[in-house]
Amino acid sequence: MLSNYLLLNLKNILLSLAAITLLSLGVSAFAKSRYEYHKNTNLAIQKKKIKVKQLQEIIEGLSKTACMPEIRIALQKVLIETLGEIKDISPSYPGIDIVIAAANQLSSVAPERIVGPVKACETDHEIATQQKLVLAAIAQIKKLPAIGKCTYAEVKTWEEHLKMMYVQIDIDAHLAYAEEALNNSDKAGAANHFRIAQNKLAQSRYHGENKKDLMIALGDRIRDLYKKPRASET
């Protein structure tokens, strides 16, 4: 009798241990799945945030050039969609609604108000940074046809334009240096920067039909520096 009782208790104990083990395994598996879910969610958000930051830097950089408005508008649309993807992943992500609203507001601004005039960079570092952003813009626009944002023909036109802007950034900087030298009565310095700008323009393969006229205009500026004033002008 006693042995039967012990065997029954032992059986119940084993069943209880088995149930506890199964429960522990279930809890562990659930905890692991939740951990993996949050880990993958955070990783996806971080990737989207990096993309958003890159697009913001590119768009802001292009705003300092005479870049075609169509390029910025296309990149702004991708920026807004990427922000929307972050919200889809995590609807309660801090500040996401405010950022989306600001991006939407910017995208509604007329193109002529989005793209400002050509602005010369002040330092070699700024020139290099600006040119890197143009190269980054080229890399981004090449992805657009695959996601239905533009045609391959548009990308080809935009890429040529951005390559022209890459050269123009350097040219504009030397033109600004030349004007600064003139303000300081440094004709030699001004002429040197005008010549550098002219040479960079001459080497450019992207400036199109008006390239020759621009080079002539720069040559005229250089000659004007050393033109002797007429007697009536003195």
Image (tube, rainbow, N blue to C red):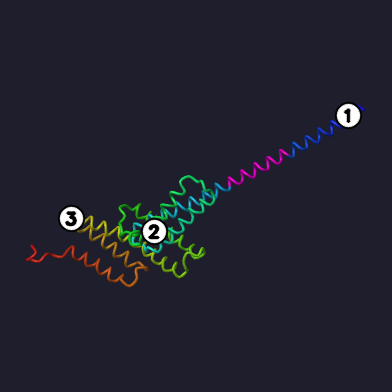
Q: Where is residue 80 drawn, in percent x and y? A: 46, 56
Contact, CB < 8 Å: mark 1 with mark 3? no
State whether residue 132 appears in this view: no
Q: Residues within 10 Å of mark 3 (few under 14, many from 20)?
A: few
Earlier along the polypeptide chain: callout 1 or callout 3? 1
Q: Which secondary structure, mark 3?
A: loop
Q: Residues within 10 Å of mark 1 (few under 14, many from 20)?
A: few
Earlier along the polypeptide chain: callout 1 or callout 2? 1
Q: Which residue is mark 3?
A: 185
Amino acid type indicated by mark 1: Tyr
State whether residue 113 appears in this view: yes
Magenta span covers which residues? 23-39
Q: Which residue is mark 1?
A: 5
Residue depicted at x 53% and y 52%: 88
Rounded to the nearest angstrom, the CA distance separating label 1 from label 3 is: 112 Å
Q: Where is residue 210 drawn, in percent x and y? A: 30, 71
Contact, CB < 8 Å: mark 3 with mark 2? no
| Quarter of the image that includes the N terminus | top right
Q: State left or right for residue 40 relative to residue 148.
A: right
Q: Which residue is mark 2?
A: 108
